Image (cartoon, grey):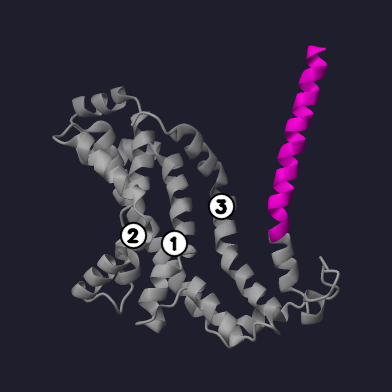
Amino acid sequence: MSKKRAKITEFVKYTSVAGVGTIMVIPFFWLVSASLMTLNEFISVPPKWIPSNPQWHNYVDVFQHIPFLHYYINSFIVAVSVTALVLLTSAMGGYAFAKLDFVGKKPLFRFTLSTMMFPAFLFLIPNFYLIKLFGWVSNYLSLIMPFAVSAYGIFLLRQFIMSIPPDLIDAAKIDGASHFAIFTKIIIPLSKPALATLAILTFIGQWNSFLWPLIITSFSPQMTTVPVGLSKLSLAFSTYTNQNLILAGMVLQVIPVVALFLYMQRYYIKGIVLTGFGGI
C-alpha cells in the first residue's frame, strides 16, 4: 500500500507541475503565434491559435517603421554594462560582509538591506538631479550609473560566500595571499552559481526597464531602449489595425531574455538552491 500511495503521490505531483508549466507557456505560445498572423486572423472570432500562413514579413515591417536595431544596441549596452558593474560591486560587497571584520559591519549591512524597502520611484527625482549635476543626461552613464550597485546583489553574494569554508581563506593567508588574490582566485571562481543567478536577474531587469529610460530618453532620443521603443511602436502603427505587428515587436524584445535564461538556467537553479536566505 505504501508503494502504491507513493506512486499516486508522485503522479499527482508531476501532473500538477506539468499543468502549471503548460499554463505558463500558453501566453508565450500565443504571443509568437499571433505575431505571425494576418490582421483578420488576429481579430477572428473564435480566436485562432495557429496562423494558416505565417507572415514572417511582420518582423521586417517592425524594423522598417522604427529603428529597432538601434534600440537593440542601446539596450545591450545598458543591460550588459549594468550587469557587469552589479556583479563586481555585489561580489566585493558580499565578500566584505561575509568574510571581513570591520567596525560597523552589521549596522552597515542592515542599512544596505533597508534600502530595498523603499520603492524605486522615490529615487527618480534625486537620481535625475545628480545625473544632471554631473552632466550625464546626454550619454549612456545616465542609464547605467544609477543601477551600478544592487543591495539585493550584495545580499545574494554575501549569503553564498558565507558558505565557502573559512579554511580555504585561512590557508591562502598562510601562503601570503592578499585580500585581492583571495577575492580573485578563491571567492570569484567558487561564486559562479550565485554570480550567474545575479547576472540573469540583473540583465532581465535592465532589459525590461521602462520608467527611468523613458525619462532619460525624453531628453536624449538617440539612447532609446527596446521597452521605450515598443511604446513608440504602438504610436507608429495604428493600434486598431496593426496589433499583430506590435506583438511581433514584443517577440523581438523577449528573445534575448529567453535565450539568456535557457543558456544559464542550470547556474540559476544551483545559485538559488545554494544561496539560501538565512543567517542575516
Label 3 crowd (10 A; few <14 / some 14-19 / many >=20): some
Looking at numbered disc 2 in the image, what kind of residue is underneath it? Answer: Phe
Q: Where does the image place residue 142, in percent across and percent down from the top left?
A: 31, 71
Looking at numbered disc 3 in the image, what kind of residue is underneath it? Answer: Phe
Task: Give whichever of 208, 252 is nearer the camera.
Answer: 208
Q: Is residue 54 visible?
A: no
Looking at numbered disc 1 in the image, what kind of residue is underneath it? Answer: Gln
Q: Name, please, the residue furthest toward the left.
A: 103
Q: Magenta segment, which residues? A: 1-27
Asked if labels 1 and 3 touch by Cβ distance under 8 angstroms, the answer is no
Label 2 crowd (10 A; few <14 / some 14-19 / many >=20): some
Left or right: 101 as drawn, with respect to 48: left
Please tell me in which quadrant of the rendered image residue 94 appears. top left
- Inspect the magenta stretch and tell me whether residue 18 lies in it: yes
Q: Which label's residue is closer to the chain start, 1 or 2?
A: 2
Dot 3 falls on a residue whose secondary structure is: helix
- Inspect the magenta stretch and tell me whether residue 145 lies in it: no
For image coordinates 77% across by 81% down, the residue present is: 39
Q: Which label's residue is closer to the chain start, 3 or 1?
A: 1
Q: Where does the image place residue 27, in percent across and percent down from the top left?
A: 70, 59
Q: How far apart are the alpha carbons under marks 3 and 1?
A: 14 Å
Q: Which residue is mark 3?
A: 261
Q: Name, please, the residue furthest toward the top.
A: 1
Position of the N terminus by quadrant: top right
Q: Which residue is mark 1?
A: 206
Q: Which residue is mark 2?
A: 147
Asked if labels 2 and 3 touch by Cβ distance under 8 angstroms, the answer is no
Dot 2 falls on a residue whose secondary structure is: helix
Left or right: 257 as drawn, with respect to 30: left
Dot 1 falls on a residue whose secondary structure is: helix
Please tell me in which quadrant of the rendered image residue 18 appears. top right
Q: Which label's residue is closer to the chain start, 3 or 2?
A: 2
